[in-house]
């Protein structure tokens, strides 16, 4: 595993945005029946999820979060010189969505902008990228925009994914600060897992076609197409045991105030907490009303689960994301007090508002 | 952990009355045998057998509760 230490930058604030529209257990009952709906809700610990009705893009959510955060920090937009957008659900195959967001947010042309294509490990990878660039470059202020609209690629008739996923976009502000304590990252990859959590069609290996769009019955009676998200839950569970548990174990020290892992589902978080002996008061579980929001889940859990703690003082955090790739990343850092505006609810009508 | 103790663990996962699950019980006859309890089974094994890692590919080959126990016994990590 690669270990990387960064210094000279600090997190100034975090904001999150979700679609206004909410899906509940009733949607699952309509798709899978009453008994199955209760089983699914109890197993994953997710009662409701904010889900786009089909028009909002990740960029719309991240834009809303970034606008709220820039206002709360009272940052001069001209002072923002780095924008990193992390998602697996971009606006287009090309160009990079970060370019669109640079323009939409009114950031200067001197702003460096790039996309990173990572899922549930993406927030920590993005934080490492931003912090590392700020260590070496001339950057003063960075926006790390991270999110996904996985529900747009989840088949409603696939019980392995539909009960789990919600949509969210987040914005994290980083600022150059020579006195900031270092952040220590652990990063890893195992591409042998590429087929266990994937959308097979729509790229260049398997372009979209008439056949890839057809939904048919697959394993365990789940119905989906090759353009839909596939998740092999049992293989992913083994992956978390093999790679993620040792990762967290190696970074966990007694002085950590909050452990915030990718909010995959309640079952896996409770299992990891039990095996790693993380006490309940330190283990953040904040998915009951948002679901698994992919790359957004860690910053969303920070803003919804422990915002009072992070607003009020300096805290030592252990963050770890893990998922498609397989890809995983952990960080220990000290941050706070942070600027954390209340969560933004984004109406469907805000989709692509800059295009009109 | 004995085979009987493993059967009791499986009963908890499948929400069956204690003592009702037998080695020859067909998994297809267990109402709670589904993709959720497969993961609960993997978690139970991971908690109780540090040196065992079950390959999910082997699970569809199991027909009975006894087959699951056999899988635990033969899946010692190399």
Image: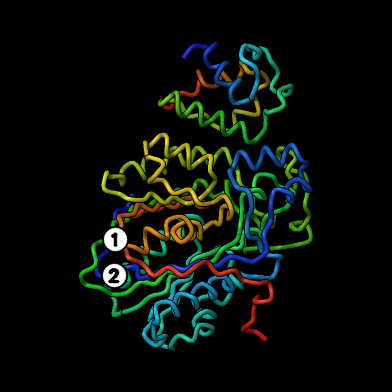
Q: Is residue B9 above or below residue A242?
A: above
Number of other residues with Cα within 10 Å of mark 1, as a class: few under 14, some 14 to 19, many 20 or more: some
Mark 1 and mark 2 lie on one chain; the one further toward the N terminus is 2
Which image quadrant: the C terminus of chain B?
top left
Q: Tell which of A33 and B29 is nearer to you.
A: A33
Q: Identify the mark at residue A233; answer none if there is no mark.
A: none
Q: Quadrant of residue B21?
A: top right
What chain does badge 2 belong to? A
Q: Secondary structure at mark 2?
A: strand
Residue at the outermost left position: A179
Q: Is residue A212 above or below residue B23?
A: below
Residue at 53% across, 71% down = A62
Q: Nearer the viewer, mark 1 or mark 2?
A: 1
Residue A85 in the image: x percent, y percent?
48, 70
Q: What residue is shown with label 1? A: A314
Q: Which element carries disc 1, helix, strand or loop?
A: loop
Task: Give coordinates of residue A4: x percent, y percent.
Answer: 29, 58
Q: Identify which residue is drawn at 34% across, 68% down.
A: A11
Sort mark 2 into few (<14), some (14-19) or many (20+) by Cα contacts within 10 Å: many
Residue A315, horizontal then vertical, whole percent = 31, 57
Q: Is residue A147 above or below residue B35?
A: below
Labels 1 and 2 touching (C-beta < 8 A): no
Residue at x 68% of width, y 21% of height: B63
Q: Are marks 1 and 2 on the same chain?
A: yes
Would residue A93 appear left or right of A271 to someone viewing this image? Answer: right
Circle 2 sits on which residue?
A9
Q: Quadrant of residue A41?
A: top right
For the point 38% across and 49% down, the residue is: A259
Residue A86 visible in the shown view: no
Across and down, in percent, residue A249 comes to 34, 41
The reply to whether residue A55 is in sight is yes
């Amino acid at each position: 595993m690669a270990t990387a230490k960064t210094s000279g930058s600090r997190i100034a604030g975090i904001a999150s945005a979700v679609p206004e529209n909410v899906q509940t257990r009733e949607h699952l009952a309509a798709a899978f029946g009453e008994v199955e709906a209760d089983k699914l809700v109890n197993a994953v610990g997710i009662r409701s999820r904010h889900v786009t009705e089909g028009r909002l893009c990740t960029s719309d959510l991240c834009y809303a979060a970034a606008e709220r955060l820039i206002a709360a920090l009272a940052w001069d937009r001209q002072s923002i010189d780095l924008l990193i957008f992390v998602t697996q659900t971009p606006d287009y195959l090309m160009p990079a969505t970060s370019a669109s967001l640079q323009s939409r947010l009114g950031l200067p042309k001197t702003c460096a902008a790039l996309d990173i294509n990572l899922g549930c490990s993406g927030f920590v990878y993005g934080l490492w990228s931003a912090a590392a660039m700020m260590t070496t470059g001339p950057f003063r202020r960075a926006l790390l925009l991270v999110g996904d609209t996985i529900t747009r690629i989840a088949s409603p008739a696939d019980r392995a994914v539909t009960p789990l996923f919600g949509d969210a976009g987040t914005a994290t502000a980083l600022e150059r600060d020579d006195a900031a304590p270092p952040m220590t990252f652990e990063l890893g990859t195992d591409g042998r897992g590429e087929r266990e959590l994937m959308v097979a069609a729509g790229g260049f290996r398997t372009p979209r076609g008439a056949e890839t769009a057809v939904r048919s019955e697959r394993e365990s009676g789940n119905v989906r197409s090759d353009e839909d998200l596939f998740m092999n839950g049992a293989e992913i569970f083994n992956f978390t045991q093999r790679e993620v548990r040792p990762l967290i174990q190696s970074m966990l020290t007694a002085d950590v105030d909050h452990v915030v892992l990718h909010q995959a589902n309640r079952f896996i978080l409770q299992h990891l907490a039990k095996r790693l002996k993380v006490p309940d008061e330190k283990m953040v579980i904040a998915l009951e009303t948002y679901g698994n929001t992919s790359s957004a889940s860690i910053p969303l859990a920070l803003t919804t689960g422990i915002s009072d703690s992070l607003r009020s003082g300096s805290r030592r955090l252990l963050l770890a994301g893990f998922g498609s790739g397989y890809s995983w990343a952990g960080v220990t850092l000290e941050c706070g007090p942070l600027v954390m505006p209340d969560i933004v609810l984004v109406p469907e009508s805000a989709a692509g508002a800059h295009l009109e | 952990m004995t085979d009987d103790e493993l059967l009791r663990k499986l009963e908890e996962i499948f929400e069956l009355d204690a003592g009702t699950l037998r080695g020859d019980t067909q998994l297809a006859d267990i109402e709670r045998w589904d993709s959720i309890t497969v993961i609960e089974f993997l978690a139970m094994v991971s908690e109780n057998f540090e040196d065992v890692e079950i390959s999910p590919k082997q699970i569809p080959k199991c027909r009975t509760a006894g087959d699951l126990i056999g899988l635990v016994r033969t899946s010692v990590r190399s």
